[in-house]
Amino acid sequence: MSRSTAALGALLIAGLLATTASASHEQRTGNPFAGAKLFVDPGSNASRSVRDLDARGRYEDARLIEKIASHSSATWFGGWRGGHGSFFAYVKARVAEIAADGSLPVLVAYNIPHRDCGQHSAGGAKSPAAYVDWMRSLKRGIGKRRAVVILEPDALAGLSCLSQARRRQRISLLRAAVRTLTSGPSISVYIDAGNESWQSPRKIAQRLREVGIRRARGFALNVSNFYFTPDERAYGRRVSALVGGKPFVIDTSRNGRGPAPGHAWCNPPGRGLGQPATSDTGDRLVDAYLWVKLPGESDGTCRGGPRAGQWWLQYALGLARRAAF
């Protein structure tokens, strides 16, 4: 990317920021999960697998997968390939479905350009303008309903894989996303901050400040990873102390047996389900334990797995057999 191209991109993002977040609003105060019901999706891959396994007489396996199907997981939004209809309409319908259940929508925004540095989850918006437009559609789809958004897993912690120009662009885009989503009082934003083995608290705190953590509710840890909850909690406290005491959430979906040897992250064997989603954390800085990653969905085409995000029954059964509950 040339210096002139980067400069034009920065100007474009600045202009879009001005139009999407001209009004100043305070983030909703207090823990958004306190007293909230969390959505258990009857149409999830796990739920469909339970019905299929029962129909085929595989009752023991069906009961194992019920350990996944009966608990709340987040809803992920990435690039839009919906064919007919718009991304805005899809978000609006999904959020309305969750709200109609009396539940708090917990959504994951995962569409940053140059996503996953070209690895298993490569993709993302094709340009800065496309990303800001996508983020606007997400915000409009949520509307005035209460919701939580986990913002861009790995985007900050994995910043170092990018060129200097693309790093600056990503920081600008994440800052724009935070401002867009927090331009009203209904959405609580948690900016993804990686995990305790990735970046030092000081480095990730600096990056969180650069993208506007002061406007967000807090940050998210351990998304799609396997680190033990106490270790993530200790790391989170250190980060929080550097960003004004902001609270955080921890992904416990697959950390029941802790990290794999060598800190392998792509479909590592021997892992187990962690504590189901709850706001009862016993820690004033930890707003919730969540299943952000959907347990049983592949991390990528490693160890015989399907593409990232695809349901993998064999792996799901292993997670359930080794569950921490």
Image: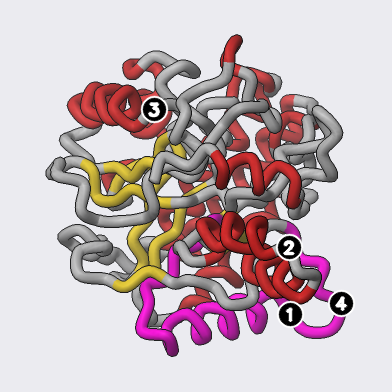
The residue to which callout 2 is attached is: 58
Q: Residue at x 48, y 76 (%)?
A: 142
The residue to which callout 1 is attached is: 86
The residue to which callout 4 is attached is: 83
Instruction: Work out how far the residue at label 4 is from the one at label 3, CA to CA, in angstroms.
Output: 40 Å
Q: Secondary structure at mark 3?
A: loop
Picture quadrant where residue 45 is located: bottom right
In this rendering, position of residue 242 left or right of residue 106:
left
- Amino acid identity at mark 2: Arg
Instruction: Work out how far the residue at label 4 is from the one at label 1, CA to CA, in angstroms.
Output: 8 Å
Mark 3 closeness class: few <14, some 14–19, many ≥20 residues within 10 Å: many
The residue to which callout 3 is attached is: 228
**Circle nearer the viewer, 3 or 2:** 2
Residue 22 position, x and y percent, is: 39, 66
Does the magenta-highlighted stretch encompass residue 194? Answer: no
Q: Is residue 39 visible?
A: yes
The stretch of residues the image draws in magenta is 79-108
